[in-house]
Image (cartoon, rainbow, N blue to C red):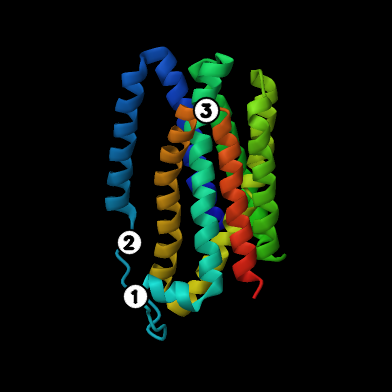
């Protein structure tokens, strides 16, 4: 799961810096054309390279109801709430950091791309090591430690006034952000042994997708009534609530 997350976050990390430079050099429209082209390449690679595997463990009793999974398993409840609110926080960060940098700090598209890419790429590289830690130490503790560190970094973003201090903070956030995903994914995989791997990972990814969809909407509403710096405090609060809920459900 650590290796899987390295590739996932690595792609997210390369996107902003490539998009930033393409936007500065070729115009904003070209960045979107490139995005469409990369998605087409991904589709072709998926069709041509992914094997057609139909094998699964027939000894697993697959529970198709997500509601039943949430009722039966406190670990699933904890993971779902943490992943949901973690995604809310990270989507707010990804969407509103460029706005904050452009409006408040006057940074260029390339500088904004460097900030986002540094955060994502460094996080993906560090997960090589945190993925191993998840096989040695308490996964519950690693999730809590990483989440708290991420919250603290979000709180300091509105206090930044120039590129390099913000770059350093993005690097610290990358370290914190790299700690919890391998552990949470590994715990979701453990749940898959009880409920079916597809159902468990479907629940896990559904929580992330809901959070990624809801976060920018909430952040946009808050920034419209207050200012863009407040949204990072909102992101910290959302992730902290997720940590509290995860701690509560997994302490039993």
Label 3: which residue? 226
Q: Which numbered disc, 3 or 2, marks the residue that appears first in the sequence?
A: 2
Residue 63 point in image, percent of width and height: 37, 78
Binning the other alpha carbons within 10 Å of mark 2 as few (below 14), some (14 to 19) or many (20 upward) gives: few
Name the one closer to the observer, 153 or 181.
Answer: 153
Q: Residue furthest bottom?
A: 59
Give the SS element for disc 1. Answer: loop
Between marks 1 and 2 in the image, the one whose residue lies nearer the viewer: 1
Residue 162: give x, y in percent of width and height. 66, 18
Which labelled disc corresponds to residue 101?
none
How far separated are the C-alphas under marks 1 and 3? 43 Å
SS type, badge 3: loop
At a point 40% along the width and 18% down the height, the residue shown is 23
**Residue 138 occupies quadrant:** bottom right
Taking the spot 43% from the left edge, 38% from the top edge, the residue there is 216
Q: Which image quarter: residue 174?
A: top right
Task: Provide the residue designation for mark 2.
Answer: 51
Q: Nearer the viewer, mark 1 or mark 3?
A: 3
As helix, strand or loop, the secondary structure at mark 2 comes to loop
Q: Where is residue 109 drawn, in percent x and y? A: 48, 18
Q: Is residue 158 above or below residue 202?
A: above
> Does residue 53 appear left or right of residue 210 in this picture?
left
| Marks 1 & 2, CB-CB < 8 Å contact | no
- Label 3, label 2: how far apart the Cα atoms are: 50 Å
Residue plotted at (35% across, 74% down): 65
User: Which mark is first along the chain, 3 or 1?
Assistant: 1
Q: Quadrant of the C terminus?
A: bottom right
Q: Residue furthest front?
A: 225
Q: Which residue, given by chain and number where applicable, does mark 1 sit on?
A: 64
Residue 140 visible in the current orientation: yes
């Amino acid at each position: 799961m650590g290796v899987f997350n390295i590739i996932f976050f690595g792609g997210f990390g390369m996107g902003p810096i490539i998009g930033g430079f393409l936007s500065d050099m070729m115009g904003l429209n070209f960045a979107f054309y490139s995005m469409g082209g990369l998605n087409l390449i991904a589709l072709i690679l998926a069709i041509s390279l992914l094997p057609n595997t139909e094998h699964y463990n027939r000894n697993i009793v697959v529970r198709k109801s997500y509601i039943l999974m949430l009722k039966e398993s406190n670990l699933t409840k904890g993971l779902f709430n943490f992943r949901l609110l973690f995604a809310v926080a990270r989507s707010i960060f990804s969407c509103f950091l460029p706005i904050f940098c452009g409006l408040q700090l006057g940074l260029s598209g390339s500088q904004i791309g460097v900030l986002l890419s540094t955060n994502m790429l460094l996080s993906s590289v560090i997960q090589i090591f945190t993925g191993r830690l998840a096989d040695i130490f308490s996964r519950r503790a690693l999730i809590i430690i990483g989440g708290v560190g991420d919250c603290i970094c979000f709180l300091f973003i509105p206090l930044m006034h120039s590129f390099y201090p913000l770059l350093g903070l993005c690097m610290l956030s990358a370290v914190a952000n790299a700690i919890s995903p391998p552990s949470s994914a590994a715990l979701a995989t453990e749940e898959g042994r009880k409920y079916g791997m597809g159902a468990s990972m479907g629940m896990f990814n559904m929580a992330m997708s809901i959070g990624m969809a809801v976060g920018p909407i909430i952040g946009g509403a808050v920034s419209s009534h207050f200012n863009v710096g407040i949204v990072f405090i909102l992101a910290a609060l959302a992730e902290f609530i997720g940590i509290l809920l995860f701690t509560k459900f997994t302490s039993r």
